[in-house]
Amino acid sequence: MTFINLFILALIQGITEFLPISSSGHLILLPMLTDFEDQGLVIDVAVHVGTLFAVCLYFRRDVALALRGIPDLLRWRIDNQGAWLALCLALATVPVVIVGLIFKLTGLMEAMRSVALIGWMMIIFGIVLYATDQQGQEAKTIRNWGLRDAVILGLWQAVSLIPGTSRSGACISGARALGYGRHDAARIAMLMSIPTIIASGTLLGIDVVARMDAQAARDGAIAAVLSFFAALAALVFMMKLLRSVSFTPYVVYRLVLGAILLWIAYT
């Protein structure tokens, strides 16, 4: 794969992974609507690894807190903030792992890679994001995150496996519907991405190891580095913007892109 192809793929993944506009939808569409070759599993895993390091760096204090709480959680001593955060993240990851396995084993994951479906999901969940953002209260912060909310947001995250939905967009919508402020809703959604990316990367990594060669390893390393910087820049941009702007600009983008995709699909 040429450097320009890797650069564009990494840029798309890095920017769209954390913005509520669907990274998987954009990555699926790129080879469908252009002459780009399908990036394949190696590059898919590589760009996700890059975004994983970016979110861990940006939220390093929360990540460190959760990591410190894991030993206590394993001993079932949930008497500190770190153990509680680790437990909530674990619970929120269970639904997406179960649904992801079902999709993979039944072949639904490949069957859903269509322009029409992505277009509809862009529009439908763009409207959902707008409605929850406008009607959601600002009553809760991440300190109020409990087991019930973790399970509910885990179900929202599982729905995001449908291409075009957006993992971050679904989780943010769910958090806003539960009453979390915009900044904390995005923060929770980003933290939820960490175990999810690790789980999906592990699942895909089993297939990747079998087909890895020197060229694929080189391309993967380049893609991972590029996606890291793109994702970090996108995170900084969104989290700062949320202090003064709602999610409406992302909603508008989703509606416009969704309409274009439906026009392409049905004409």
Image (spheres, rainbow, N blue to C red):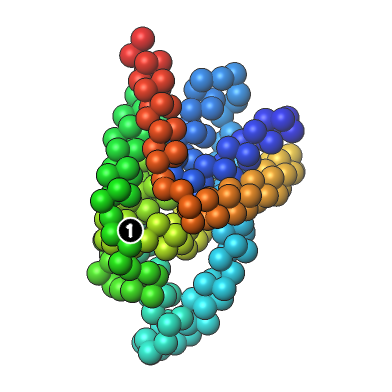
Q: How many marks?
A: 1
Name the one closer to the observer, 98 or 85. 85
- In the displayed structure, would residue 113 be above or below residue 262? below
Instruction: Assess disc 1: are there few (<14), some (14-19) or many (≥20) residues with their C-alpha within 10 Å of its C-alpha.
Output: many
Name the one closer to the observer, 187 or 218. 187
Q: Position of residue 29 (x, y in %)?
A: 48, 28
Residue 143 in view in this figure = yes
At horizontal 72% and vertical 30% (from top left) the residue drawn is: 4
Determine the image quadrant of residue 146.
bottom left
Q: Residue furthest top?
A: 267
Question: Is residue 76 rendered to the left or right of residue 43?
Answer: left
Name the one closer to the observer, 107 or 237. 237
Name the one closer to the observer, 164 or 114. 164
Residue 106 in view in this figure = no
* Mark 1, secondary structure of its residue: helix
Q: Position of residue 63 (x, y in %)?
A: 54, 71
At horizontal 30% and vertical 48% (from top left) the residue drawn is: 134
Question: Is residue 206 rendered to the left or right of residue 123?
Answer: right
- In the displayed structure, would residue 90 be above or below residue 12? below
Q: Position of residue 136 (x, y in %)?
A: 28, 55
At horizontal 52% and vertical 82% (from top left) the residue drawn is: 68
- In the displayed structure, would residue 123 be above or below residue 242? above
Identity, as a three-letter code, of the amino acid under mark 1: Ala
Tag 1 residue:
175
User: Where does the C terminus fall, quadrant-wise?
Assistant: top left
Question: Is residue 115 rendered to the left or right of residue 41?
Answer: left
Question: Is residue 245 rendered to the left or right of residue 215?
Answer: left
At horizontal 59% and vertical 54% (from top left) the residue drawn is: 236
User: Where does the N terminus fall, quadrant-wise?
Assistant: top right
